[in-house]
Image (cartoon, helix red, strand yellow):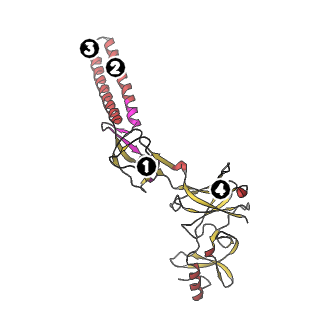
Amino acid sequence: TNNLRIIAEVELAPDRVAHISPLLSGQLTKVSGEIGAQVKAGDKLAELSSVEVSEASARLASAKASVKLAKETLARQQKLRDDRITSERALQEARRELELARAREREASARAAIYNATSGRGAATLSSPIDGTIIERHATMGEVVDPEDVLFQIADTTKVWVVGRVFEKDASKVLEGMPAVLTLHAYPGKSWQGKVTYVDRVLDHRTHSVAVRMELENPNELLKPGYFGALHLDTGGDSKPRPVVPVDAIQRMDNKTVLLIPGDEPRSYSVREVITGVEQDGFVEVLEGIEVGEEVVVQGAFVLKSHLMRSELGHGHAH
């Protein structure tokens, strides 16, 4: 057979996941964002009050006050110099004092920025670094947290990985770039087409298998991390992958092998004659008749076929 079937699972793409922890210990004073909520990069998720942040905020406020004072002193010295009341040295001194005050303000400002501190409030803001969905939340109002605590996990699920394992005996047949079709237990009769994007370079000696990965766009979020199914790999070197359908979808009508295809209208179906190939583990490959990605009726296909035959509408549609 050219069709190798391996068990696979939908996973989050690791480069599209963010774990959010506080930079310092403190108490959560505000928490927003429920599990499942969509967030944009920069959206505020929580506020944390802590001694360090209060100190950083106080230092910034004091540095700002020093700059203001130094500016006023300089302006006064400038006026006295213009009126020839004070020396050039006193003016230079005032200029240097302002430079120092500005340097201290920059440092205090940088420190406060690290904590995302809102000035004067002594609270640090935790915000999302990416656009995505909150998939985990371990933050409760009033709770005391530390830098090692992961308070939120945010994932961009618009692209996912599908990871399967291929046994040692078949590993040499699997190549990057080869066509692959995904079927999932959650969606009988539906399939997704893609290519193998990565084959592990190392054999896992415990399982005697090699990890195989396919990356898929997931715009309508149907592919949920944790869903199980199978990857059907076309090892025949054929550039076009063959569709695979559950065996229960295949029916016989008028001595023909057929599949029932849902129509555009609700509860309308058309009958499609197909040629089937190899059957394996409850799935069968379809050599001709349907394209990869087309939906077919699986549940109740037999009952529906009997109803179609009774209505003698074997030529096309039944409503």
Tell which circle, 4 or 3, labels the residue nearer the N-terminal end: 3
Image quarter of residue 256: bottom right
Look at mark 4 in the image and give the residue it sits on.
Answer: 196
The kind of residue on which mark 3 rests is Asp
Q: Residue tagged by mark 3?
A: 83
| CA neighbours of label 1 inside 10 A, class few (<14), some (14 to 19), many (20+) | many
Q: What crowding class fits label 2: few (fewer than 14 Cα within 10 Å), some (14-19), or many (20 or more)?
A: some
Q: Secondary structure at mark 1?
A: strand
The answer to whether the residues at label 1 and label 4 have Cβ atoms under 8 Å apart is: no
Q: Tag 4, which secondary structure?
A: strand
Q: Is residue 129 visible?
A: no
Kind of residue at disc 4: Val
Task: Measure the alpha-carbon separation of dots 4 and 3.
Answer: 81 Å
Compared to residue 186, the image places residue 12 above or below, namely above
In the rendered view, does 77 fall on the left or right side of 34? left
Give the quarter of the image for residue 116: top left
Residue extent of the magenta highlight? 108-135
Q: Position of residue 32 (x, y in %)?
A: 36, 51
Q: Decide whether residue 141 is among the magenta residues.
A: no
Mark 1 or mark 3: whose residue is earlier in sequence: 3
First-in-chain label (2 vs 1): 2
Spatial separation of the CA atoms under disc 2 and disc 1: 44 Å
Can residue 163 be seen by looking at this rendering? yes
Q: Return the disc, 1 or 4, that comes first in the chain's sequence.
A: 1
The label shown at residue 152 is: 1
Q: Residues within 10 Å of mark 4 (few under 14, many from 20)?
A: many
In-front residue for pair 239/264: 239
Q: Which residue is mark 2?
A: 97
Query: Mark 1 belongs to which amino acid?
Result: Phe
Foreground residue, 34 or 267?
34
